[in-house]
Image (tube, rainbow, N blue to C red):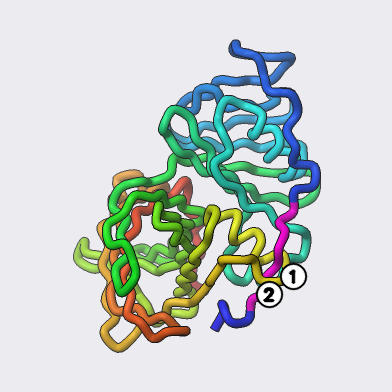
Amino acid sequence: MIAAALAFGLSACRDNQAPAAAPRTGNTIGGANVSVAGYPGLYYDASLVSAVPAADDHLRLVGAMTCPQMDAMLSAGQWRVADRLSLPPGSAGAAIAGIVPGLLLERAGTLAFVALKGDRALCTGTVMKAGIDGIALTGKGLPGPTTGWSATTMCIRLGDDTLNVSLYFDTRAKIGGLATVTLVGKNEKYTVDGSGSDFNILMLNHKSTVLDAFGKAFSGQEKPAGVTMRSLEPGDAFSGTATVDATAADRPHGTFSITGLVDDATEATVGLSLPFACADVQVIKAG
């Protein structure tokens, strides 16, 4: 099991992430923009960062800076950092498990997730609104339909009717996690394929926030207090369906629902329903 092999630790990386002075109001501040289409008040330095809107609710920031520096820059704006996942270099198991560093930002009741990807002095931040409707966690000790958020970190098209989706989620019940699922379409209906090697659902109980807990869990030291991580595997009664709106082929969105998952530690049966929304889709062609 992936979860059993993970090393836990007590501290996430925060180097170079303290924001500079918060910006004043206005459209620009010494070359720094504080107004972006769809994200008013999002702070970025226009002399170092190019903003590429993809749609009203998707934005890509490409910067001549490290990802910790972009984290600090975005933290200085009018959007409050509600949660953060940062990792030290070489974090054990993080890349294998699909862990993507990023920020959950909040402004006036709206949540946005920024996935941070880059190598050394070039970072890309993909900004997207977080989904808040259609979240449910079912099973013994789980809240059922609940308030929370879901943020898609990656979408990969493996064929004309096959879409691989990865996302983070968290709930008011302080149960969150990471899900990677494959949605397979046939006759305009989608099912969840639980038989492939890409299928991976980690559920995490925490006392803080899910991204903070993941950052600590993958820092490679000791187990964080109050954090329990477990893998959910397809059981004999596994079933999964999805609704997929692919009107914009490069930005599909919808909801997937799965029943018959089994907790590998307790053997309890678990079900979940989560919304997803792809900021873009990578295409991998067979052969």
Is there CB contact under 8 Å for labels 1 and 2? yes
Foreground residue among 73 and 206 = 206
Element type at marker 2? loop
Q: Residue at x 38, y 46 (%)?
A: 131
Q: Given the image, on which type of amino acid does mark 1 rest? A: Gln
How far is mark 1 from mark 2, CA to CA?
6 Å
Locate residue 21: give its quadrant: top right
Q: Which residues are magenta?
A: 6-13
Mark 1 lies on residue: 221
Residue 154 higher or lower than 96, as above or below = above
Which of the labelled discs sits on residue 7, or is there none? 2
Question: In this rendering, does residue 256 appear at all?
Answer: no
Element type at marker 1? loop
Locate residue 136: give its quadrant: bottom left
Residue 128 higher or lower than 93, as above or below = above
Foreground residue among 252 and 287 = 252
In the image, is residue 12 part of the stretch drawn in magenta? yes
Question: In this rendering, does residue 133 appear at all?
Answer: yes
Q: Is residue 163 left or right of residue 178?
A: left
